[in-house]
Amino acid sequence: MSAAPVARPGWVEPLAAALAAHDEPWVDVLRPAQGARRSAVLALFGEGPAGPEVLLVERAATLRSHPGQIAFPGGAADPGDVDLVDTALREAYEECGVLREGVEVLGALPAAHVVVSGFDVTAVVAWWREPLADTPADPGEVAAVLRVPVADLVDPANRVTARHPTGFRGPAFTVAGHLVWGLTAHLLAAVLDLAGWTTPWDDTREVGIPDRYLRDRRPSTLARDTGGPDAH
């Protein structure tokens, strides 16, 4: 006898409805897709002790690109992938053991073009109906798996504007001893807005990006050993 379906928590519904309505307030913040090579990341939310939480990965410090940075699981589309949802789910399994049968896809944000990597990146947004596995499946790519409460992300004390040495500025989050910045932070901010979770914060409070996140050895590549898309 099969188990009864898991009921969606109330917090899932506004996010699912916003995605279905194609209400993407961030499309004018990032460059739209340009027909480049495709990649996908999985923005996976689940029910935690303090309410909704999101799955993030700490990239291995030995990677050539974006070592040590915090990102969504994800990477380049493979020829065998059915679509970008399949890409995102495959990558989440390969990087941190997330089993797709426990995941319900809610929708996707429009693809954003990343100039440095040359990829069009699509964020697939999903609800973790049954949290099945969440530990690094490939230590060569992922140093740690983080489940960050949304309450921490929307806390104004944890929101800042990141300042890159090149002059890039963008939204960022200080969580779990890390700075979440670049494309990952843009995508997080977009989903928080869509779900109606965002609270006012001081975007004039700037922080520099720590040196440990700026040690790329091959900054223009997004391949199997680079995990998620380029950070800015």
Image (tube, helix red, strand yellow):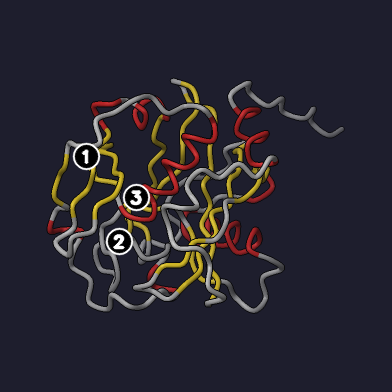
Q: Is residue 7 left or right of residue 72?
A: right
Sooner in the amino-acid sequence: mark 1 or mark 2: 2
Identify residue for label 3.
144
- Quadrant hosting residue 157: top left
Residue drawn at 46 percent across, 53 percent down: 28
Helix, strand or loop at disc 2? loop
Identify residue for label 2.
60
Sooner in the amino-acid sequence: mark 3 or mark 1: 3
- Quadrant hosting residue 183: bottom left
Helix, strand or loop at disc 1? loop
Q: Are marks 1 and 2 in contact (CB under 8 Å)?
A: no
Helix, strand or loop at disc 3? strand
Q: Quadrant of the C terminus?
A: bottom left
Of circles 3 and 1, which is in front?
Answer: 1
Identify residue for label 1.
177
Q: x%, y% of residue 150?
A: 42, 30
Q: Estimate the spatial distance between the alpha carbons at disc 3 and disc 1, rounded to whole Å.
A: 13 Å
Label total for image: 3
Q: Estimate the spatial distance between the alpha carbons at disc 3 and disc 2, rounded to whole Å.
A: 8 Å
Residue drawn at 27 percent across, 34 percent down: 159
Residue type indicated by callout 3: Ala
Of circles 1 and 2, which is in front?
Answer: 1
Residue type indicated by callout 2: Ala
Sooner in the amino-acid sequence: mark 3 or mark 2: 2
- Front-most of 116 and 97? 116
